[in-house]
Amino acid sequence: MASILADRLRQDVLTGALKPGARLTVKELIERYDAGAIPLREALSRLSSTGFVTAEDQRGFKVTEISEEEALDIHNQRSELECIALRKSIELGSVKWEADLVATYHTLARLQSTIEGQALTCNPEWEAQHTKFHLQLVSACGSQWLMRFIQMLIDSSSRYRQLSGYLHVASSSKRDVGAEHKAIMDAALARDADLACALLRAHYRDTMRIVVEMIKNARAPGG
């Protein structure tokens, strides 16, 4: 039960249904999730280890705030770790790794990033497949610990993208995210680690630039 609740809480934090800085009282969460106090406290404790929820002495829990500084830190660490893992995957990846990468990209390319008629609402199917694509890129690195850290950074990146309204900005700009994904995949399949990593870094850098700009705009007077 605690695992299911942790997943539901995590999803609500990722999408902003539980807003940054919001206090999480057990009484309110019992009503919201129709669950008992003990599994809810366990779920909150699990989420606090991921950084999505912050435990406060004698005051319970709250949704972790967002900041430009943290967004940039997540971006920098994710870029570094994923490039390490991508280089190893290109070196060690099998034919099955290649086939799974192509299949994952193909599915992602067929999905819309936002829900039709709701420009600011991320399509959860696209979001899940987007995560699968980036994880598949680095899945042959041979290190479970590296993959765990990358998964945490991907989740945190996803939270910032969704909260900042990034998808709306990206969809209305000239940026072709799908083409960026394909270029990264093609370089990985060609076993060109230098090019693949350069493209991956540029992909994340462009995303983070938009995210940070949206955070600044949201905090500006009248934003």
Image (cartoon, helix red, strand yellow):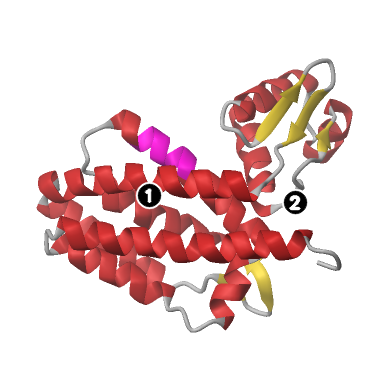
| Disc 2: CA contacts within 10 A as few (<14), some (14-19) or many (>=20) | few
Label 1 sits on residue: 79
Single out the residue that lies furthest toward the top: 58
Relative depth, front residue between 179 and 199: 199
Q: Which residues are magenta?
A: 147-153
Residue located 66% across and 67% down the image: 121
Relative depth, front residue between 71 and 179: 71
Give the amino acid at mark 2.
Ala
* Quadrant of image for the C terminus: bottom right
Q: Is residue 96 left or right of residue 56?
A: left
Relative depth, front residue between 30 and 166: 166
Say which mark, if any, is on residue 100. Answer: none
Say which mark, if any, is on residue 17. Answer: 2
Q: Is residue 95 left or right of residue 204?
A: left
* Picture quadrant of residue 168: bottom right
Tell me residue 182's x, y (percent): 29, 71
Give the amino acid at mark 1.
Ser
User: How many discs appear?
Assistant: 2
Residue located 85% across and 29% down the image: 25
* Magenta stretch holds residue 150: yes
Residue located 26% across and 43% down the image: 85
